[in-house]
Amino acid sequence: MIRAGFDVGGTFTDFVLEDEAGRWHTGKRLTTYPDPSEACLEGLRELLAKAGVSLAEVESTVHGTTLGSNIVIERRAHGVGLITTAGFRDVLQIGREKRYQVYDLQIAKPEPLIDRSMIWEVRERVLADGSVLVGLDDEETRATLRDIARKGVTSLAVCLLHSYINPEHERRIAELAREVAPEMVVSISSEVSPQFREYERTSTTVVNAYVITAVREYLRKMSGELARGGYRGRLFIMQSGGGVATAEAMWNLPVRMIESGPAAGALIAARFGVASGHTNVVAFDMGGTTAKLSMIVDGEPASVGQFELHRVKLAAGSGIPMNVRSLDLVEIGAGGGSIARVSQGTIRVGPESAGSAPGPACYGRGGTAATVTDANLVLGYFNPARFAGGTMTLDVEAARVAIGRVAEPLGLTIEEAAWGIHSLVTLNMELATRVVSIERGNDPRELALVATGGSGPAHACRMALALGMRSVLVPAAAGVASAVGLLSADVKFDTSRSFVSRLDTMSPDRLTRMFAEMEAEAVHVVGKSSAGSNLRLVREADLRYVGQGFELTVPLAAGTLTSDAIGEARRAFDEVYARRYGCAHPDKPVEATTWKVTAHGDSRPLRLPEIASAPNGEPARSARSREAYFPESGGYVETPVYDREALLANHLIRGPAIIEERESTTVIPPGMAAVIDRHGTARVEVER
Amino acid sequence: MNRPDPITLGVVWGALQSVAVEIGTTIHRTAYSAQAREGQDFSVAIFDRRGRMTAQGPYSPGHMGAMNFAVLNMIEAFPLDTLRPGDVMLLNDPALGSGHLPDFFVTQPVFLGDDLIGFATNIVHHTDVGGSRPGSQAVEGVFDYHQEGLFVPPTRIVSEGVPNEQLLNLIAANSRTPENIRGDMAAQRNALRVGERRLQELVARHGVELYEACIETILDETEATMRAAIAAIPDGRYEFSDYLDDCGPNTEPLRVAVAVTVSGDSIGVDFAGTSPQTETGVNAYLNYTRSYSYAAIKCLTDPYGPMNAGALRPMDVTAPEGSFLNPRRPAGGGPRAIICYRVFEAVLGALSQAVPDRVAAASSHFSNPTWGGHDPVSGRRFVTYELILGGTGARAAQDGVEAMASAFNASNIPVEALEAVQPAVVERFELIPDSGGAGRFRGGCGVRRDIRILGESIKFTNLSERQRFAPFGLFGGRPGALGRTVVNPGRQDERLVGGKASLDLRYGDVVSFQLSGGGGFGDPRERERDAVLRDVRLGLVSALAAHEQYGVVVDSGPSTSDTVPAVAVAPASGGTAT
């Protein structure tokens, strides 16, 4: 079976083709604007030609894109309107009201996606139990819809109070809209996100309505072009939560594919972790401006039911909230471009970044600030002649001058300052990892670290050492990891619905009926996507003690629910609670807020490529050597440098050592050693 | 003591800050009650062995001033040579802690071997500690703190790791929500243990001597940064005054008078001229007054910088003893949160003369009502706690933010979350047009939230402000519209009720909380025409107000929503700078 994956990023679009023999062919080209599908189709054609395969032979393609996220950040959509319950027109503007920076008096909220003049109210009211307090008047609604159409609305979001429990009024508005304005696309919240908490549900529905026109146009074009090229397979789209679904499934729910890049990256980290015997890992991806940290638990990237799009300077609470399953990710301002400066007698690194333009001083593009990349160059970790696959030559002297400006006021040598910058950015990431793992109830000492990204492998070993982690894994070909990740994703579709009720008074029959409806919906989507019929349904519930404002997710039995099954869920909740928070409260009543179903379709595990082997424990041969700085060795020492491409399975590399590959550099400090495994992953064992 | 090398300093400093965050994360993760979990109404800090704060986590500003002094008060009660590893001390004495009984301050000495190396501490606001009304924050009928709940002087609640269970039972039994208090106290102790362990690891890694050298440098460097920021403020004595509406029905306004003196690299905040302490719960013990004074100065000097004892050195906050900002025992202080905006804004108002580009006009004032009664559907008694928040005041180069908390930082409660668990129907939740103070930059709008209460025998306690004294504007900016609380708006029995009234309500009564608008900044006539037209198009400013206040004539602009009360014109003077 031949499969193709392509992932559109901000700068590059990455490609991977898995051939009949399970071999990977990879490619990369610049993303095209304004139409990213051009680069996708060009790059795909080129890759197919290289592999000698025709599009007709490809059985499935998986596509990841940040299109939706870009439309939102650029505020590019027009003609988007919103209908709310009377009295709640400002739900989007009011939000949750908490300050995202406590002491900064100059902060602002991001501009709402829909202008207040494009928001209409309808007279109706549903209560929390689903009963109707005020009915919806058809005539009034038609008049409102006519007004909406007159104002030029082509995509309409509808979010009424408590529609997650009683969607009748929203459905009726959608029907009337078809009658009054047949061309108008309508997104109703009870379909997009039937979960309680009106701001978050409205926000999700509005984002859906905001991107739907452009996403449909894009998917239509992409499918059309693929078909014209002779493609007969399905086009799958990566969702933010790490599962794929067909392009058709995204037709009405484009919000599900809002940001797929990080999910694909974590999937491949998970896959490499499992292949090396580590099912619980921290995926650590350090790029040019930020470092992303995510937890992999039992071989699966941890996901969350909510996330925020486009936070202001990464601050929690500053972005657009969405009830969309997404990767559980923490992002901090620590990357190769992070700027180091002198402050309060020491060095602070980041969160400001020199980005790629002007970039670090050593790029020679006019940047003068000392960055992490400048420090890594001065320390001898990076090869000035082979940076970014040899496409760039770095200016060591410019880096030394920039670092010198940090060193001088502190009375440090340039080398000491460079080491300080390297150590302190590593410290920032170490501390973030500590919080990420303990917040989620994991002890970092029991986890492995999977490092990717241009800068990740240069810092990973030091970070693992500080955290007491035993293993660091640096997969090969990390440069196109996200495209490869697409191929390792399962077909998956989730549905959820809020129904706030105490477990001890809840009707099992009503719950069974609700799950039957939700499961039919999920099966409908996944069944159509899956070749086989091995469909798996997983039920979950968000539960909390009565009086608490936060929930934990627990599994729920399949089939017809009985009061025993509900009691079982309650016991499971006490257990999960105790594991996470230390002790449970079995005597307190428990209530459910949201019920969830995920349908998993067939999955075809990705075969990781294998490389040729050397005899066990054979020392690898270095390609060259250069001076690199290791304080435990007393400063600069002649350090062997290995070419990643030349390494064989079983090769042993003792630190201090440097491994170079196209897009990244791995630094192995003294006292640590790496073994290359059969997939080409460098496995570093950290001595405690 | 030698100065540590810059890199080690950076490592110790980063790690110390991280220990504070880890203590906070532990509380956040393990607390039981919603306000500790979701409202993050807690604070955490690390101290050195001399009781100096070395790092504070980024949580409630209301505890910022208290932390530093509470530890010193604890050390005074328990001399250092009496402390043992595993001891935990508790206090909620309003005068020694953070100003009201629900705030439980706990501290644990941390030892490395036999050496005391510092203290881990935290404060959590507990749901209820008894007293005359649920939530322990009554305004009326409170003439001392003995009516506000259980009073705990400095008390050792855990001795060498062994908790005093009888004492803990006694504390829980005094609360209307004993599970919450147990759960949240357990979280506080978990957090202390995490702080103890991580501080021990940190000091063991670097050695006591190097660690202590780092601490000296951290405090000195933070002080130096703060002093440099203060030195950049022009020297002078800057005065400002403002009023709280009242401290209950039929009471007089309370005057907040402040003089901020910037002299070189230090700053003094003196509340001389402030009204005397009250025989109600509306009093702020000095630590609370300090907290929001520090918070205001931090906003204007080093908003993203570290908070420790060094940062506090250049600041001195005083208020006359016996005033309501520095009351004598045993003044009540339960609902002190209602005071915090006024303290914060008075300092901003004073310093607006010195650093106009950095300040903001006064914000919309929040309402924090509570009510309880009998729910005829469930057959249970219930207590509802609401928090309604409006917009912020305008800034020198930006409008105020619509619907965002100010100094007292919290989230609103989603309508669907409230209605799912309480017998209430929210009838509207919207911005109030024409309420934002006009100005070159407009203040954020007030917010209106109408709630129909579906309970019987309702005991309702209002806690609202800015119904007589509008949020002030700055530099020609107009004050925001006054707030008001109305029972059954639009009905025959409609009536205006006081901001701190206690009422009996009937099944189906509607309470409409209409918050004041934020103050404007700069002359409204200088506002860009396009900005005025935009506000009119959005329905946030009426065509009439555009004409009258901004001098902008709108041809055929839509009039504002018909649901909105008329603008309060020329409200009583808010703050005044002198």
Image (cartoon, coloured by chain):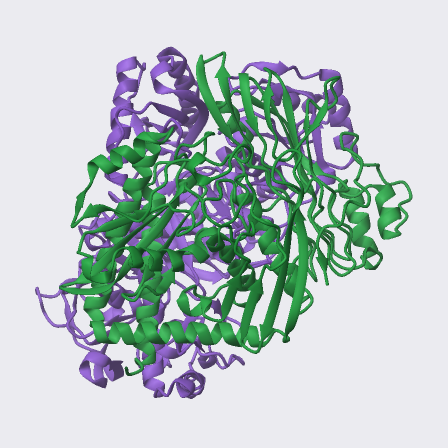
Chain colours: A purple, B green
Horizontal and vertical percent for residue A672? 16, 69
Report if residue A19 is visible in the image. no
Q: Is residue A512 left or right of residue A645?
A: right
Horizontal and vertical percent for residue B547? 88, 47
Horizontal and vertical percent for residue B60? 46, 51
- Residue A339 appears in which quarter of the rendering? bottom left
Which quadrant, please, contains the C terminus of chain B?
Answer: bottom right
Q: Is residue B324 left or right of residue A577?
A: right
The residue lying toward the viewer, choosing from B351 and A398, is B351
The residue lying toward the viewer, choosing from A20 and B407, is B407
The residue lying toward the viewer, choosing from A72 and A493, is A72
Q: Is residue B336 left or right of residue A477?
A: right
Residue drawn at x 20%, y 72% as measured from the top left: B207
Which quadrant, please, contains the N terminus of chain B?
Answer: bottom left
Horizontal and vertical percent for residue A469? 20, 58
Residue drawn at x 58%, y 54% as measured from the top left: B343
The residue lying toward the viewer, choosing from B310 and A403, is B310
